Image (cartoon, coloured by chain):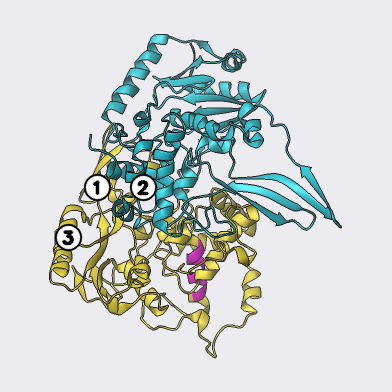
Chain colours: A yellow, B cyan
Amino acid sequence: MQQVIKAKAVELLNNGTVNRVLGWQTGEFFYDITPAVFETAEEVEANFVYNDFCGANLSKYLVKETAKEGDEKIAVFLKPCDSYSFNQLLNEHRIKREKIYAVGISCEGKLDIEKLRQAGIKGITAVETQGDKLLVSTMYGDKEFDREAALAERCANCKSKKIVADCDEIIGEDGEVLESARFDEVAALENMTAEERFDFWRSQLSRCIRCNACRNVCPACTCKTCVFDNHDSGIDTKASADTFEENMFHIIRAYHVAGRCTDCGECSRVCPQNIPLHLLNRKFIKDMNELYGEYQAGAVLGAKTPLTNYTFDDCEPSIVHERGER
Amino acid sequence: MKKISLNKLNEVFSAIAANEVLYIPVDTEAGVAKFDKWEEGKELSGALNTVRSAKGFFFPQVENMAEFKVEGKKIEVIDTREECADFVMFGVRACDYRSFSILDKVYLVDPIDTYYKNRREHATIVTLACAEPEETCFCSTFGIDASEPGGDVSAWIKDGEMYFKANTEKGEALLGGIAALEEGDEAQVEAAKAEIKAIIEKLPISNLNMDRFTGENLLPIFNDEAKWEELSEACIACGTCTYVCPTCQCYDVREFDTGKCIQRFRCWDSCMYSDFTKCAHGNPRTTQLQRFRQRFMHKLVYFPANNEGEYGCVGCGRCVKKCPINMNIVKVIKALGEEK
């Protein structure tokens, strides 16, 4: 796959279709991959990588890239879940389609090095896939690990292998929307008592260091100045002064992206404290599905979102009260 | 040299906690470690490092500084500082321990930061040698010896036992108060040290070349816009690297109206943020490239130029592990330094 993608990047640069390519660059190790813009075939040949650790969703970088002056196009490689973010950004007029050459690529699920570390594996120097197993080389000897158990959370609960964006071309097989178990954990939280649920979230959110990585990586968070950074907003906060602020930052953010969040899972991927932030967003998605009918943000270009589209059959506001009784 | 069997470590903790508040690294349900107050049932984490570094003991993320009460034209300033109680930090790694001496160079020079000093003076530090360093470790680049971690007491783990050596009077007193300790064999500790050193030799990034990072090279490094552009290109401007960093020391001072008084507090700041060092005239660094460059210039050039060559990095590897886009100081050192 990597060879095909690299060849495509080189071809697009050499034939002048684009003047730069957005992709992933090799790091110091096999897993520390950085999103990067490549401007020459030589750079692509030397540093472009596509492997099990290219989890980063590139869509948001297109906001910055397509705002640049000039008519030249940038090529971007979109995994199925990234293609939802891509569509959503188009729906919100945050990226310019005419300045993008989009290449859809199939995905077998990305690995999360943190899963290996959490299992107590230290000093990891290489990971090789052998069927459904991973052969993990470390400073302290080789270990075997189930590939399934090393998948990033969003990949273990993959919602779709389908490239939903209208790409200029697709490399590999396009897949289907999947039946996933992604709402199971939300349902488990719903079944808790209010007190248990509060304890669960306090325990999780108390680890927050307010680094803003979840917000800054989020393809739905594209405000030029976030309300939490705006000194004139009266609610700007650089640190959470108390537990209330700690909770509210994440809850308000979840509200703000409700109906727009595609469940790409970047927030949880980047959280240095492994806070399962995606569960907040999934709760909103699940609620919207139940109240307004099935809706997947980013699935359809030009779709009207349930929260900004009035229909006669919309539930009454009293639904909040009724559901609160549970 | 004292020792105790690892399965009796609880006795050490309860003996210490009988006299002072004790903090140890513990595992959380999310598989990340943190320093937590010890109480019966809490066990020492096997993780190499906590996500938040140990700097928070002396320089917490948020702390109140003063209160102001306004009545008519009178403003009463209330000093809210209280003398800190003695406490023990157990299981501090060599990298984090070194970070304290870097922070001291900022906070304990004139004008002394009394908030920091208050906590610093009341701490007894028990360090723990790194039995299993990770591929992300590069403390030896900065002359730190993970097998000789320092502090008031140094500890080592070897063959199911923990060994302790007091380095200061405070450390002697601490160990003297733990009845469960037995006499330990120096040779075992020497063997443990040799094992650690052998692993560190083999670590992939343990020996970075720092030769170019001197005050004399400030301008050529600073002005290498093309490199900085390439390095900072994917930065999402979050504060992860700065907030997990044991040596990042910048803070912001803010006030808010509690309804009863004006509370002045300070909190960690990050040079990655767009409002970093923003003042009345605006912001001296208007692009992410400039803010990104500031972080590394500070650690690799400005700080050593002002502090007898001591770098503002201890090679703990937290930023290497935690950066959302995997850009970090190691990549910066390699891109702007010299080939070894």
Residue type (three-letter) at the residue carrying disc 1: Lys
Q: Going by the image, does A320 lie left or right of B80?
A: left
Cα distance between the residues tagged 3 and 1: 19 Å
Which mark identifies residue A75?
none
Q: Are marks 2 and 1 in contact (CB under 8 Å)?
A: no
Residue type (three-letter) at the residue carrying disc 2: Phe
Q: Going by the image, does B16 lie left or right of A112?
A: right
Return the residue nearer the eye: B45 or A183: B45
Which mark identifies residue A133?
1
Q: State the image quarter where residue B185 is shown.
A: top left
Q: Tell me which chain the residue with mark 3 is part of.
A: A
Residue A43, horizontal then vertical, whole percent: 19, 56
B171 shown above or below A116: above
Return the residue nearer the eye: A181 or B130: B130
Residue A52, horizontal then vertical, whole percent: 26, 54
The chief SS type of the magenta part is helix
- The residue tagged with tag 1: helix, strand or loop? strand
Residue B57, horizontal then vertical, whole percent: 58, 35
Residue type (three-letter) at the residue carrying disc 3: Met
Q: Going by the image, does A130 lie left or right of B43?
A: left
Circle 3 is placed at which residue position?
Answer: A1
Can residue A36 be seen here? The reply is yes
Task: Name the residue located 35 percent from the left edge and 69 percent from the top edge.
Answer: A179
Instruction: Tell me which segment is drawn in magenta.
Output: A280-288
Q: Tell me which chain the residue with mark 1 is part of.
A: A
Circle 2 is placed at which residue position?
Answer: B222
- The residue tagged with tag 3: helix, strand or loop? loop
Whether the magenta-drawn stretch holds residue B183 is answered as no
- The residue tagged with tag 2: helix, strand or loop? helix
Q: Are marks 3 and 1 in contact (CB under 8 Å)?
A: no
